[in-house]
Image (cartoon, helix red, strand yellow):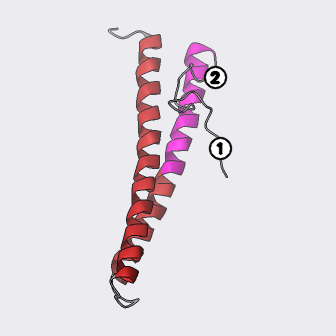
Amino acid sequence: MSMSKPIAQMRISTDIKQAEYAVDEALLRQGALMATLITTRRETGSGPAMGHDALLRLVKSQQDLLSAGGELARVHGSLLKIQQDVLGYEECPEGGPMELNAGEPVQAVA
């Protein structure tokens, strides 16, 4: 055995935190893109049909990211169960995946 359980937990914790952050970052960037596309269309005097297909695809992409974020939350829950079974506790480590970089807890939204 080359990796201790606490080291494995730390690596998994770091990776899931980064994955959760990446989904949020992608959603923010897509939101900014949506705003830019609509603002540009309006400010250039383009018709409402201009770029409509691209906007529909962008919205679909946002929906897919939200679904991926939900699946990632389920992964996180499954990993907490494994942590409880293997290490005997269920709490995320301090600075773990359920906390923001500033140390503020992430609020679950249904």
Taking the spot 65% from the left edge, 44% from the top edge, the residue there is 108
Is residue 86 found inside the magenta-colored segment of the image?
yes
Taking the spot 51% from the left edge, 39% from the top edge, the residue there is 75
- Magenta residues, start to end: 69-89
The Cα atoms of the two marked residues, 2 and 1, are separated by: 17 Å
Q: Secondary structure at mark 2?
A: loop
Q: Residues within 10 Å of mark 1 (few under 14, many from 20)?
A: few
The residue identified by callout 1 is: 108
Taking the spot 41% from the left edge, 74% from the top edge, the residue there is 39
Q: Secondary structure at mark 1?
A: loop
Give the amino acid type for the residue marked by disc 1 in the picture.
Ala
Give the amino acid type for the residue marked by disc 2 in the picture.
Glu
Please give left or right for residue 45 compared with residue 21 in the image. left
- Point out the tag, 2 or 1, that comes first from the N-terminus: 2
The residue identified by callout 2 is: 90
Give the number of the mark in front: 2 or 1.
1
Magenta stretch, overall SS: helix
Horizontal and vertical percent for residue 33? 37, 64
| Residue 88 higher or lower than 17, as above or below | above
